[in-house]
Amino acid sequence: MDAVTNRTVHALDREGTVRDWLVTRAWSEPVDDLERILKTDGSPWGDSGRWVLTNGPDVTPLKEALYRSRPLRPDVPTEPVTEGGPVTYTGPTGLTHEDTWQRVHTTPDGLVDWSAFCFTPEYRLALAATVVEVDQAEWRTVRLASTGPTMLFHNGRLIAESDTVSYMEPIEHQTPVWLPSRTSTLLVASWQVAFRECRQVLRLRINGLPVRVVIPSAGADEYVSAVAEQVLDAIGVTRWGSVRPEVPLVGPEGARLRTWWTDGPQQATPVRLAGGQMRVRLAGASQAEDRSDGVGSASMLSTGAGALRVAVDDDRAPVYRSFPVAVLPPEYRAEPEGDPVRWRQELLEHIIGVDGVTAAELARWELTGQNVTGSGLTRALGMLTDRADCADFEGVGLLNLWHRVPPAAWEPGLRARVRDTLLGFKYWIDQPGLDAMCYFTENHQLVWHTAETLAGEAFPDEQFTNTGWSGAKHAEHGRAMAREWIERRLAGGFSEFDSNAYLAIDTLALVSLAEFTTDNSLAELAAGLADRVLFSLAANSWRGIHGAAHGRSYVQTLRSSRLEETAPIMWLCFGVGALNDAVLPATVLATARRYTVPDAVRAVAWHCPDQWWGRQSYRGSYRFAHDLLERPYGSDAVVYRTPDVMLASVEDYRVGLPGLQEHIWGATLGPETQIFVTHPPNASSSPSARPNAWAGNRILPRVRQFRNTALALYRIPPDDPVGHTHAWFPIAHLDEWATRGVWTAGRVGSGYVALATAGGAVPVTSGPEAWQALRPAEAGTAWVCTVGRRATHGTFEEFLASLAEPRFDSDRVRFTPPGGPDLDLSWAAPFQVDGRPVDLDGDGRPEAKLQIDNLACRLRHGDDEMVISIDGAEHRIDLRRGRPLPPAGGQ
């Protein structure tokens, strides 16, 4: 019988990173001491102003001040550090926290990650422990990086403490440690205070000769576990998302495994890989499960994914790997079927099935006349009462119910609860109260102004308890800011350009104003901008997929368009898209009476010529008291689409500067086949990591596009934490794929895409991104993407054979697409097509760009009227006054 060693043993990675830990969950404690530092009333600005609570980077000094008043205690748990063993820890406020030590194997960036989006402020505490073993005693240098204060203990003795806070990227501190010739326990206590997105991570590296990492675990055998880890490191999941509750696994032939879905029954399912693959059914999984911890139906903060854990089927090997996977909404439509009446009916019937959200109550009343019930409003009312982030979205949803549904159709007492909640709510940063609700992103601004306007108009003679103002004063306050916000976007466009999350939120607010404000001129302005928003969605999408470049986006929406918040809006308006749970904006649009979607906008969405080439140039300026920035903003987005494929980008966007959530370029062939490249700062896909591995870029690239070809240049600094770019290229969703030289190409139907980088790229073959990500052979500082179709380029083999090899140089790439001109892009020089700078006009001066230039609309900056004309349909928007609306009767 094999001896049981009661431990597993692991190696450091090449950079000396500890990848294997025992951790606790993140414990929370109330933030009840903000009033000692911040003023609850008066001006929100200045060093002690409450404005800092809602902006991640600027809140750092406040977090450090809070840590000084409530620091970690220099105590360690007395219990032995062993897997599954108990752990007790006393937090800064004296609360005692309990948990059990749980095993974690980090992602390749080596970060132990407790990050979360917290809708109300909270202190967060967590512990991580590992054991290191050396045979010869020696000094080592321990490098501990974290985004918040830490205490580092060696065998129970405090050896290092940091009080530094950073926003997203961890800060490293070095400590010399004498390691005796046996095992040593290293324990780290982590502290954070959360205001919205909370990046709570740490990483530990050990300089010098390698050490062994030991995880104590009763019943474990280190030799069996070592073999198990070799097997697990060769396991991969080839589809992040599927409409069926099953996951395809690949790995070593004949391997016998245990799998379990972390959100379902915890009993493991035994499987065996036959032919090196297996499909695992997810017990208890449902479509696109909401992991947003109580956020309402107008948020994209859920990842859309759960986790599949995989272990080798042997009790002596407690090691495992975790794979994020999503069960996707099944309803997707690439071409319209039926008419707008049918699409509206389908949408409302779908919404009724979404539990516990305001949108379902509104849809149910619209379809059946059934009374509004408290169970559907519990979450929304709770968010307003708690002043949770995104409560403004839910406030607008409640106000739609208030105005739309007559008093007799409410559950007894419920309407009074809604009234009291709205009267006690806070509607802008200049009003009393300490909270971490977001006021300063573009979409939130208008939602706040809409909520305040409609609430004030609903109760003009009532006193609002938070401010003491009358409803009439609140309405005046909200209307003035809403009017200015709308006028600026009508004139110049959006900073969060074509966001597949927040364009929907803009629609929610604009249609609500158009429907319910008593100020008809404001309603008409809102309707005019809603037309512009929906026109942008129609022009910059393809077959129900919002495949444009985005000012802000999230990982799940880039991996599957079924999860885009704009998808239900497209279903309602254009008969394409998907039905998911982000339904409040679409519900408000579906129940509108005054606002209707212009026929010309629908015609743009349906117009599918052999080639569509569109440009969109937005210009505006940030205002500090609204955006916490004070500079111009601009974006130059382009879209190329055919019946078979789409390629889109935003050109020369803040080149070489730090990125956040921008999606700069990509090709689209289907709902799960969006192809793109990013410069990742980490290995996370969490919405609280901004940027993360797949949404955003650590440093923004230079991208230029000519029709069906995009060229992209990236700069990777010597100290970059990842050191390379990577491509999302989900092979399992392709009908066919192939490589040729530096090219990797794929086909879906009659549409083609090809990617090239210096030295070529190879598919990742194991892990959560197996056969979905491409890793460049070199750093991947230059990429070429070109798209094609059977009708133009022949068969897939002929398309691939026609591709010349790009010329890659330092900070430069040149390429001649099949039958196309010579394209030349370098980091600092003009983008050239056939040797001529394309940004110069015929006189050799910088070209004056149109604000919109496509087959349906040509709009110059400064024009007073926008005309949309296509396929015999025409629509006009007065960019100073909006567009006329019918009378507000019958509401």
Image (cartoon, rainbow, N blue to C red):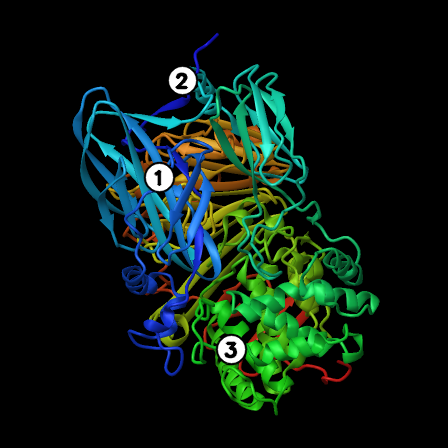
- Residue 704 on image: x %, y %: 40, 51
Looking at numbered disc 3 in the image, what kind of residue is underneath it? Tyr
Looking at numbered disc 1 in the image, what kind of residue is underneath it? Thr
Residue under numbered circle 3: 427
Looking at numbered disc 2 in the image, what kind of residue is underneath it? Thr
Residue 529 visible: yes
- Residue 443 on image: x %, y %: 51, 68
Q: Residue at x 29, y 60 (%)?
A: 64
Residue under numbered circle 2: 5
- Using the image, tell me which numbered label, if any, was put on residue 78: 1
- Residue placed most toward the observer, 280 or 159: 159
Locate the C terminus by quadrant.
bottom right
Residue 804 visible: no
Q: Is residue 217 left or right of residue 133?
A: right
Residue 290 vs 31, above or below: the answer is above
Task: Tell me whether the residue at label 1 lies in contact with that at label 3, contact meaning CB atoms closer than 8 angstroms.
Answer: no
SS class, disc 2: loop
Disc 3: CA contacts within 10 A as few (<14), some (14-19) or many (>=20): many
